[in-house]
Image (cartoon, rainbow, N blue to C red):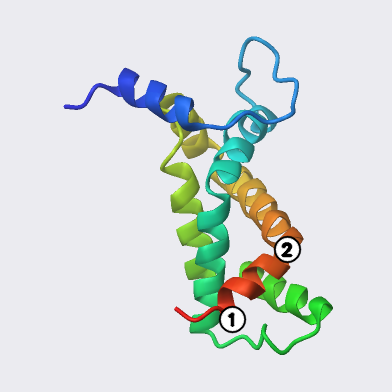
Amino acid sequence: MPDTYSFDEAVAALRPAIGADLGSTPAATPDDILHRALRPILKLHNQRLLHLVADYARDYRLPLGTAAPADCERLLDELLRRNARLQHTLTGMVTSLFTTAEYAFYRRHRPEINRRLLELTRQRVLSQAAAVVQLVTEPE
């Protein structure tokens, strides 16, 4: 069986620093998971998240290349809010990089953590809508 401790260390070492005062000891709260895990993991996965959303937008033939910027944001927002397959894929990408303790906390607070994770992802993607449009319109 793999050594959980070394997995946790490796996962934690991958995470980029974020500009938040986290304190010295982690607390077992959704806010702590938000700042210690979700934000760094989403920052680490940023380019992959944009590619994933662009792939879904392309699969669903969203007219991002011809739409006005406000319409692009609206279309991406609807995709992120309504597409359960995309939401499950995003959730899996992020939770796969949780430490053992974070995943145990996630299992007990799944609805709240998923809500926060999807909202953060939505904000991140919508703030970079132009990059998603560029990825969709690029030849493969």
Q: Residues within 10 Å of mark 1 (few under 14, many from 20)?
A: some
Give the number of the disc on residue 92.
none
Q: Which residue lies at the image location 70% right of the left edge and 31% below the top edge? A: 31
Q: Is residue 97 above or below residue 81?
A: above
In whole angstroms, how far apart are the C-alphas of marks 1 and 2?
17 Å
- Reading the image, the residue beneath label 2 is 126
At a point 33% along the width and 18% down the height, the residue shown is 5
Q: Nearer the viewer, mark 1 or mark 2?
A: 1
Q: Quadrant of residue 112?
A: top right
What amino acid is at disc 2? Leu
Say which amino acid is labelled 1.
Answer: Thr
Along the horizontal axis of the image, is 39 left or right of 6?
A: right
In the picture shown, does residue 120 fall above or below 81?
Answer: above
Q: Nearer the viewer, residue 109 or 74?
A: 74
Please state which of residues 105 and 15 is positioned toward the viewer in this rendering.
15
Say which quadrant the C terminus sits in.
bottom left
The image shows residue 104 at horizontal and vertical percentages of: 45, 30
Residue 1 seen in the current view:
yes
Packing grade of label 2 (10 A; few <14, some 14-19, many >=20) is many
User: Which of these two is toward me, 99 or 135?
Assistant: 135
Q: Tell me the residue at 74%/78% (across/down).
A: 72
Q: Where on the picture, by quarter, is residue 41?
A: top right
Element type at marker 2?
helix
Residue carrying label 1? 137
Q: Residue at x 60, y 39 (%)?
A: 38
Secondary structure beneath disc 1?
A: helix
Q: State whether residue 82 is above or below residue 106.
A: below
Quadrant occupied by the N terminus: top left
Furthest-left residue in this view: 1
